Image (cartoon, rainbow, N blue to C red):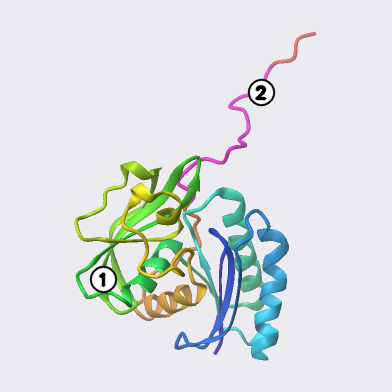
Amino acid sequence: MPVLALDTSGAVAVALTDDAGAVLAARSDDQQRHHAELLAPMIAAVLAEAGVDRRDLSAVVVGTGPAPFTGLRVGLVSARTLALALGVPALGVPSLDAIAAAASRDLEPGADIVVGTDARRREVYWGTYRVVGAGSVEVVLPPQVGAAADVVVPAGATVVGRGALLYPDLGAGSVDGHLLDPDPAELARLAIERRAQGLDLPTVPLYLRRPDAVPSAASKRVLG
């Protein structure tokens, strides 16, 4: 049964896989701040390319970030809404996990990976992972946010993600020039594997920062 996976933590990316994680169709677009306009047409495009009716989906997988509020919210709301309408589970996987899993395919078990993505404000979202096997990683330090210069990079670790490209002081760079943003196909594989292990996969967003626009703490009294 096909699985739809999407991520809006950076670029807008959509993939359709089978229930073993093999890619049937995929689309991505790295335009920033256009998530709402791009996502729905891309979902329709991958379904059409694979010849799959959305009613045949067995699950919808979504990257949970960390990422800025607006872009991440588009993906989470879309995934939850589609899953609810179809009566299938919505499965959440941290977006950094997908980048680490992709990097692990070129590394030996036991190797350390630091994933850094753009958090704007001259900061990065980052986390540290250890390779268990090809496509499989364990979390050493969970996702957090801070200045690139403050990221703790273990000796010999491989640094991947768009943050490594934007902020050279983060580390040594990328295993592969394509390992900048989460691959939704990796999200789908991780979700399939973790669900088989009986793990909970909530679609709770990892914002790590408050949104820029917040309501005032208290109403001001109007005199007159």
Q: Magenta residues, as a range?
A: 207-220
Compared to residue 200, the image places residue 55 above or below, namely: below
Residue lying at 46% horizontally and 85% vertically, measured from the top left: 21
Residue lying at 64% horizontally and 89% vertically, measured from the top left: 50
Q: Earlier in the sequence, mark 2 or mark 1?
A: 1
Q: 184 and 172: which one is in front? A: 172
- What amino acid does circle 2 point to? Ser
User: Could you tell me which quadrant the N terminus lies in?
Assistant: bottom right
Percent x, y for residue 28? 60, 71
Q: Residue 88 vs residue 126: left or right?
A: right
Which structural element holds mark 2? loop
- What amino acid does circle 1 point to? Val
Residue 181: give its label: none
Q: Is residue 107 magenta?
A: no
User: Could you tell me which quadrant the C terminus lies in?
Assistant: top right
Compared to residue 89, the image places residue 160 above or below, namely: above
Percent x, y for residue 95? 46, 63
Q: Residue 218 vs residue 128: left or right?
A: right
Residue 219: give its label: 2
- The picture quadrant where one finds residue 111 is bottom left
Q: Nearer the viewer, mark 2 or mark 1?
A: 1
Which residue is tagged 1? Answer: 131
**Disc 2/disc 1 C-alpha distance (Å):** 51 Å
- The crowd level at tag 1 (other Cα within 10 Å; few <14, some 14-19, many 20+) is many
Q: Is residue 209 magenta?
A: yes
